[in-house]
Amino acid sequence: MSTNLSEGGSRGADEPPNPSNLKQFQSAGRGFWSHVSDADWNDWRWQLKNRITSLEQLQRLMPTLTPEEHAGTMLANSKLALAITPYFFNLIDPADENCPIRWQVIPRVEETHTALWEMSDPCAEDSHSPVPGLVHRYPDRVLFLVTDRCASYCRYCTRSRLVSNASGYDFHPDFERQIDYIRRTPSVRDVLLSGGDPLLLSDEKLENLLGRLREIPHVEFLRIGSRIPIFLPQRVTPALCAMLKKYHPLFMSIHSNHPRELTTEVREALGRLADAGIPLGNQSVLLRNVNDDLTTMRALMQKLLMCRVKPYYLYQCDLIAGSAHLRASVRKGLEIMEGLRGHTTGYAVPQYVIDAPGGGGKVPVNPEYVLSRNADRVVIRNFEGRIFEYPEAADGTPLVAAPREIEEPELV
Ligand code: SF4
């Protein structure tokens, strides 16, 4: 088993992560699959075909499975399926029960514990769907679900009611009706393809969808949300990139939660997408035991920039049923944001958001930098905790003089 990644980021309970290890780019290695040919290993379809999907496989590859993981895996296929690509499996440190990769993809028995406030559809997507598979919550954009399959399944997935079909949701997108709705709704200028993972579609199928959406005159902007560059970088082939670049403006949001996920393979895949002119953003979920400390989060954000990806959102984990063991507190999220803003490159600072339970949409959550505000002045503090006043200007009225009590001339 390859453990060449195990030094960077696995945490014992009292062991802080090592920032310089976290920021190194390493290959995931071959691990148990050293006998596999390069052609197979680098073939995304081979990776999908050889995913770890059963308790038997998992036990064989990882005899260190804990009782919680064993019980969770036995129950997984009635809730959210188990699937891990061989490539991504190699990032797990089998010797470390607290391995941040392991916590994201190996089921745990805690998934069966549901708190009163947890939901199967915390963002109320189903009640905002004018046609099946299309979520229209915000005025000018829609979420277009194209599949219920992913390369691997994240145990905290907000769409776990639907993805993998383990709980019998039976999702069948109807592309004709979805596209027809967009065509008939001129306010929709932005379409986000998601799922499941849209990059699991063949190039031909994906191109057909992108081409049909591009033909709609009021659709200005296309986006793809995908975790494939992280779970299955082999899928990001030159042919896929050449196809995608025909449909600009096309943005892509990837999903990465821990710096160890950013391997040399991932960096190369993201480079291919960036070279195709696709602006890349990252969405992370704040997860207990995975990335809920400043050192790890800062390393992730800085490493994303090194991969040409702008950190976009940091999500407070949704109230998805059975996710309490993975949910970090909002207090922790604010503490991390406080430690990023001003302390590192502005591009490396994502927007921390809570997707308001029940379908309220994304609400930005920020540490308090405005201490007070009235008609004359705003009192603010900076990242170092120093306090400043900014004289308020009446709308449309030029500010002619700074109030005398301002003590910091560089502010004016
Ligand atoms: S890749 Fe996205 S949709 Fe798929 S399981 Fe993970 S979070 Fe859910």
Image (cartoon, rainbow, N blue to C red):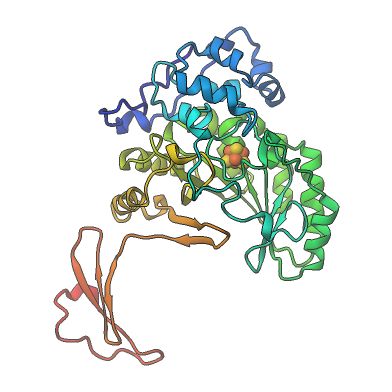
Q: Quadrant of residue 10?
A: top left
Q: Which residue is most to the right?
A: 176
Most distant residue in the top direction: 35
Image quadrant in which you'd find residue 61: top right
> At 21% across and 72% down in the image, what residue appears?
388
Q: Quadrant of residue 403?
A: bottom left
Left or right of 356, for residue 373? left
Residue at position x 35%, y 38% in the image = 296
Q: Nearer the viewer, residue 344 or 8?
A: 8
Q: Classify residue 161 as left or right of residue 28.
A: right
Residue 318, given in percent of the width and then of the height, sits at 50, 49
> Residue 304: x and y, percent?
46, 42
Which one is nearer the viewer's eye here, 239 or 231? 231
Residue shown at 29% from the left, 50% from the top? 339
Looking at the image, residue 197 sits to the left or right of residue 358; the answer is right
Q: Quadrant of the C terminus?
A: bottom left
Residue 276 in the image: x percent, y percent?
64, 44
Q: Is residue 224 visible?
A: yes
Residue 267 seen: no
Depicted 374 relative to depicted 139: above or below = below
Assign ligand 1 to one image quadrant: top right
- Percent of width and height locating residue 83: 62, 26
Q: Where 369 sits versus 296, above or below?
A: below
Comparing 167 with 116, the one in front is 116
Looking at the rendered structure, the number of numbered marks drawn on it comes to 0
